Image (cartoon, rainbow, N blue to C red):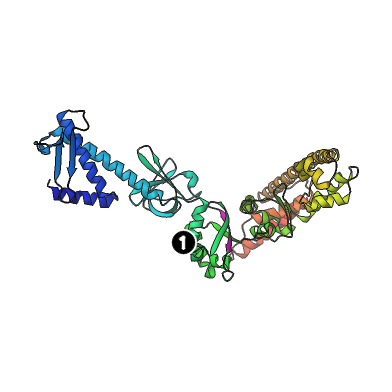
Amino acid sequence: MNGPEMIRILDSIARDRNIERSLLISDLEQAMVSAARRHFNTLDVEEFQCSVDPISGTIDLTRHGEPLDMDPAAFGRIAAQTFKQVMIQRFREDERNSILDEFSKRVGEIVTGTAQRYEGGALVVTIDRAEGFMPRSEQIPGEQFGAGDRVRCLLLDCREAGSQVKIVLSRSHPDFIKRLFEVEVPEVAERIIDIKAMAREAGYRTKVAVASIDSKVDAVGACVGVRGSRIKNIVDELNGEKIDIVRWNESSQILIQNALKPAEVQEISLCFELGRATVIVRDDQLSLAIGKRGQNVRLAARLTGWDVDILTPEEFNKGLEIMSEVLTSIENIDEQHVDRLAALGIVSVFDVEEIGPEVLATELEVDEAVAARIAEAASARAKVVAEEQQREKEEAEARRQAEQEAARRLLDGEGLGEMDADTTAAAILGAASMSPAPSEDASQEDQASGDARADDILGGGQG
């Protein structure tokens, strides 16, 4: 191989592998020195020197500073094999260093790759000239990719792992949502709108708190877009994951109220000692505030940094009454002390037990002995209340199971036997909800049969 052709090959490798040309020439020189040492069977690392002209490709090999009379082409098969191994090893090291340097600068950015395969639950993705992997913990639950599918993800980490470069990708990390907002919402990328906080349960729901530094720009409206166009692109990328845009507020009470939307909040009581927010909502808003499997209140708590407790007005008043009853039973403690604790967000015997006698003594301005008696009385009553709540929960669960069993028996044509009126009514309603609705094109005979079946159910309930 002549010199110019060798230089063209080095230029092609440098361009394809994104490696500095000077590094490849240095690798070639080192490989030639190793081949000469192998041929002459010498251990002296300073015996041979090699230089390659970067323009012409001419190789100058010297021994002890004198030009070597022997042509490198005559070194033989073993020396040639040594040259090849050294070149491959050095090229791989250069490529690894190049990949590490390139992707280390891109950590935290969104990258697009092609899905290759799953290895032990981890998804292997080709990104440019490198392979990254997405651990199961960084995948969106229920999401599957086939070979060749386009994958858009966050470059989470890039580090050396032995002789390889480990590139970690993620689609479940909260920063992935943030980067998507920067792509879809120019105001976020330009820092006109700031994402203040974020809470995410990947694949299910995300809450994002946003604020605008420009009074003329509506943060929520800009993120949603015209007719929801901007947020729709993000939701589509996440395969339908719900995203709630929350308006940020420096007031914790307003922020918690915004974070719990779409539920309507009546009142919020903050306890800074416990970091707890007691939120009061109407009965018809309770399930909406808590959310499916507690998801709404859980994300709101993570978004705001407060431990959020959802109560109905009846539960809140009952807790206050029990606390007032316990405190006023202590000598020299009256309703004013109770009101003072309520103003501090301490609204139940559980809260009194948790803050302890030291805080009670300070806030109520009472002796430590009195504070200790208050804490002791609250602790004793808290155990009783906890047992009552557990018993009520078990009774409600048993009642629910009984209603489900009764509804099943009705659908199967079995009698209800002896059963109280409430359970019978719940069973009939449950059976109606479990029965498939007749289609619009059902015949009159089918409709009559359905009416007769309803009469049988009602008759069985009365029996």
Q: Is the N terminus in the top left, top right, bottom left or bottom right quadrant?
A: top left
Decide whether residue 94 is among the magenta residues.
no
- Given residues 379 and 24, the one toward you in this image is 24
Q: Helix, strand or loop at disc 1?
A: helix
Residue bearing the label numbered 1: 183
Residue 34 % position (x, y)? 20, 35
Location of residue 60 in the rendering, given as x and y in whole percent from the top left corner: 14, 42
- Judged by its main secondary structure, the magenta piece is strand
> The magenta stretch spans which residues?
201-211
| Residue toward you, 58 or 281 | 58
Q: Is residue 81 visible?
A: no
Closer to us: 344 or 137: 344
Residue name at image x 55 percent, y 61 percent: 194
In the picture as drawn, the residue positioned furthest to the right comes out as: 331
**Residue 313 vertical position relative to residue 405 in the rendered view, above or below:** below
- Looking at the picture, which amino acid does disc 1 mark? Val
Task: Please tell me which residue lies in front, 246 or 53.
Answer: 53
Q: Up-down: is 439 above or below 297? A: below
Q: Position of residue 451 (x, y in %)?
A: 68, 60
Label 1 crowding class (10 Å Cα cut-off): few <14, some 14-19, many 20+?
A: some
- The answer to which quarter of the image holds residue 86 is top left
